[in-house]
Image (tube, rainbow, N blue to C red):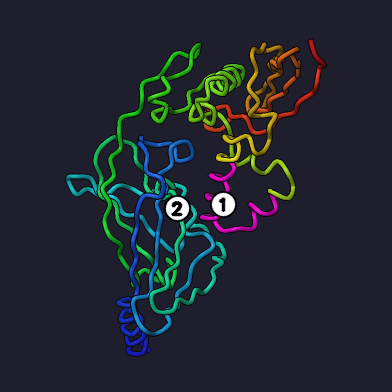
Amino acid sequence: MAAAQTAGKAAAAADLDNISVSIKYFDRTMYYPGNADANPIFVHISIKNEAAETLRFKLADDRMFSIDFIAYSVKNAQLPQTEALIRRRTTNQTVYFREIALEQGEEYSFIENLKNYIDITEPSVYYVELKFYPELYKSKYLDVTSNRLTLEVRPSPSAASATVLPVKEKTAELLRPEEISPDKVVEQTIIARQKSLWDQYFLYMDVEAMLQRTPSAKRKYTSVSADERARMLERYKADLMQSKIDNDIVAVPERFEIERTVYNRTEGTVTVTEWFKYPNYHEKKSYVYKVRQREGIWQIYDYTVTNLGTE
């Protein structure tokens, strides 16, 4: 039995020579420690068949059972894995996967957030590579290592005053959300829209929840792969910026007044009266922004609008 098992491993290992795995940054920006949701490090992963024969491998629906990111400091110290990754792999559960078949020269690609795998707590320069497990994580003796990327993690931007927009337009990419109250979250979001500062506009918005406000969009979003979900979110943001969808949330008020803020420890609403200028009149509307708190940060996840007439 042991000899047959060893032979099987040797044959499978030989097949690994036919697999090419490469990684690159999907949408490179400035990266800071921590906060995987607000400042993700999206990595584009490609698996390619370099042989003439058909290449077959398993790919888990939860990619954490198919890949590992390995990160090293400049002193060659390996960074720890996230608690979420360790907990998921040590929990007794069924791992769902599908078998992928690639012909010669074909490749399969997807996108993952590196911060879901690696706990990055300090600014520094790191070196990152990926291990791909064609027979899933439980068969770790079979793996393919990718190319290596250089990752620069910068110090977190200093906290800004809650009474003004955090930073100037030219440095909007440096923004990180702050632990400010729900009314300040809504106030900063509206001001950002008035000034067309899109990075600031999306800073306190749960874009994923906003995209799923309609049942059809939610059904589609929940039925596709992780990389397609990432593309859907980017398209949704692009459509908002071009005012192609959800015109009420991206409409630009001439002025606004926060009328009422109600919230408990996790959820709340902020009611705002907004005036929109037209050539011969002003249109008046009441917005109710729904907010919820995640890890100390309030985010807008839904809204309603009521027309209050004209002035």
Q: Where's residue 248, x and y in %?
A: 70, 29
Mark 2 burial class by Cα count in 10 Å: few <14, some 14-19, many 20+: many
Mark 1 or 2: the one toward you: 1
What separation in Å lies between label 1 and label 2 (alpha carbons)? 11 Å
Q: Compared with residue 64, is residue 230 higher up or lower down, i.e. above or below?
A: above
Which labelled disc corresponds to residue 41? Answer: none
Taking 299 as reference, is 108 left or right? left
Which residue is located at x 56 percent, y 51 percent? 229
Q: Amino acid at mark 2?
A: Glu
Tell me, yes or no, whether the highlighted magenta stretch contains residue 219: yes
Residue 149 position in % (x across, y down): 28, 52
Crowd around label 1: few <14 · some 14–19 · many ≥20 (10 Å): some
Q: Secondary structure at mark 2?
A: strand
The quadrant holding residue 134 is: bottom left
Q: Which residue is mark 1?
A: 229
Q: Point out the tag, 1 or 2, that comes first from the N-terminus.
A: 2
Q: Is residue 211 above or below residue 273?
A: below
- SS type, badge 1: helix
- Say which quadrant the C terminus sits in: top right
Classify residue 146 as left or right of residue 302. Answer: left
Say whether residue 9 is magenta: no
User: Could you tell me which residue is drawn at 47 percent across and 52 percent down?
Assistant: 87
Q: Which residues are magenta?
A: 218-236
Q: Residue at x 51, y 65 (%)?
A: 60
Amino acid type at image mark 1:
Arg
Q: Is residue 92 left or right of residue 81?
A: right
Farthest residue, direction right:
309
Residue bearing the label numbered 2: 112
